[in-house]
């Protein structure tokens, strides 16, 4: 059996995040959800994430800055 890929989903809209999580899990992915960029960056740094899907417009650390921080780590 092929190991599940892990997707880190980031969105400050919890309803959108929940829908995305269900859609991806029903397709066989392991999904980690975060409601802000700061939590997502901390979770990414712990490892085990294959893909990051992020909202671009969020308070605090927005999606663009999150991706920059991920690329720098």
Image: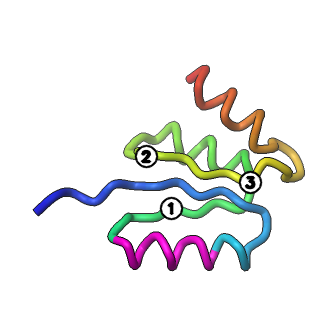
Assign a secondary structure to mark 3: loop
Assign a secondary structure to mark 2: loop
18 is higher (above) or lower (below) than 56: below
In 3D space, how far apart are the residues under numbered discs 3 and 1 (Cα atoms)? Answer: 14 Å
Give the class, few, some or many, for how many residues have Cα within 10 Å of label 2's Cα (few <14, many ≥20): some
Residue 36 percent location from the top left of the image:
74, 55
Task: Tell me the magenta residue range.
Answer: 18-27
Residue 73: say if magenta: no
Q: Is residue 54 left or right of residue 60?
A: left
Q: Which mark is residue 32?
A: 1
68 is higher (above) or lower (below) than 38: above
In what quadrant of the picture does the C terminus appear?
top right
Q: Residue at x 37, y 65 (%)?
A: 29
Q: Is residue 15 left or right of residue 49?
A: right
Residue 21 percent location from the top left of the image:
54, 72
Please give the residue where the numbered disc 2 appears in the rendered image.
Answer: 49
Assign a secondary structure to mark 1: strand
Please give the residue where the numbered disc 3 appears in the rendered image.
Answer: 55
48 is higher (above) or lower (below) than 19: above
Q: Residue at x 37, y 72 (%)?
A: 27
- Determine the image quadrant of residue 19: bottom right
Marked residue nearer the N-terminal end (2 or 1): 1
């Amino acid at each position: 059996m092929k190991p599940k890929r892990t997707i880190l989903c980031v969105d400050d809209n919890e309803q959108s995040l929940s829908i995305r999580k269900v859609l991806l899990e029903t397709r066989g992915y392991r999904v980690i959800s975060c409601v802000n960029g700061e939590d997502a960056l901390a979770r990414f740094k712990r490892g085990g994430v294959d893909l990051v899907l992020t909202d671009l417009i969020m308070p605090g650390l927005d999606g663009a800055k999150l991706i920059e921080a991920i690329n720098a780590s």
